[in-house]
Image (cartoon, rainbow, N blue to C red):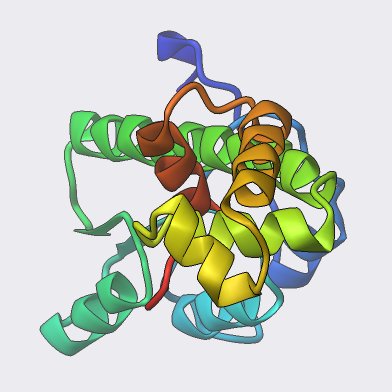
Amino acid sequence: MKSVGLRSESFGSAQEFLTRRAGDGSSCLVLDVRLPGLSGLDFQRQLADAGVQIPIIFITAHGDIPMSVRAMKSGAVEFLTKPFHDQDLLDAIQLALERDRARRQQQSEVAVLRKRYDMLTPREREVMQLVVTGMLNKEVAAELGTSEITVKTQRGRVMHKMQAESLAELIRMADKLRLMPGK
């Protein structure tokens, strides 16, 4: 890993990994199926239950198809059986790191949008909810029991506070915030 510029850490057990301080950058976990104390698959589930989001690459000399299916269904990036080529592991690590970067970027974007959304008044949130479903200002006004001109003003404040330059952009923001109906 050093030969391709990747930094790595080793841990003697799952518990040792859990007690370490998480870094700020993208990361992944190369995990053997057989660990001291509990299986790698059980550890994967434990991490998921604890809300720890880290891409996992499994390696094993004792794998079978049901085991690999279980790992992949639970979100593993790759399941490599020993012996494997070094390049296969490096490729899996690069994929896992890219997924982690993308996840971190998405979380950052959502956090920014959440701050903007939290600045909206309760009425502006109602207006936004209705507008992003495709309702016209007059329909929103009828739904909320107010005037169309008031809705126009509130919609303008929503667009300004959310920093949306178009309705389409506001809809994408609402989707990222999971405000869209059926999300």
* Residue 92 location, quadrant: top left
Give residue 164's quadrant in the image.
top right
In the rendered image of this protein, does residue 19 appear above or below residue 88?
below
Which quadrant of the rendered structure holds the C terminus?
bottom left
State the count of labels.
0
Q: Is residue 59 left or right of residue 152?
A: left
Where does residue 91 sit, x and y in percent of width and height? 25, 32
- Residue 182 lies, in percent from the top left, at 37, 78
Residue 88 visible within the image: yes
Question: In the rendered view, would you say 49 is above or below 82?
Answer: below
Residue in view at x 20 percent, y 80 percent:
69
Residue 145 in percent (x, y) is at 65, 74
Identify the residue shown where x is 43% and y is 11%.
Answer: 3
Q: Residue at 84% across / 54% down in the picture?
A: 121
Location of the N terminus (image quadrant): top left
- The residue at 53%/82% (across/down) is 45
In the depicted view, which residue is nearer to us: 23 or 177?
177
Give the residue at the far left of this rendering.
65
Is 39 situated left or right of 110 in this image?
left
Is there any visible trace of residue 30 in the rendered image? no
Horizontal relation, residue 73 to residue 125: left or right: left
> In this view of the protein, which residue sits in the foreground, 128 or 97?
128
Q: Nearer the viewer, residue 119 or 3?
A: 119
Give the x, y percent position of residue 68. 22, 76
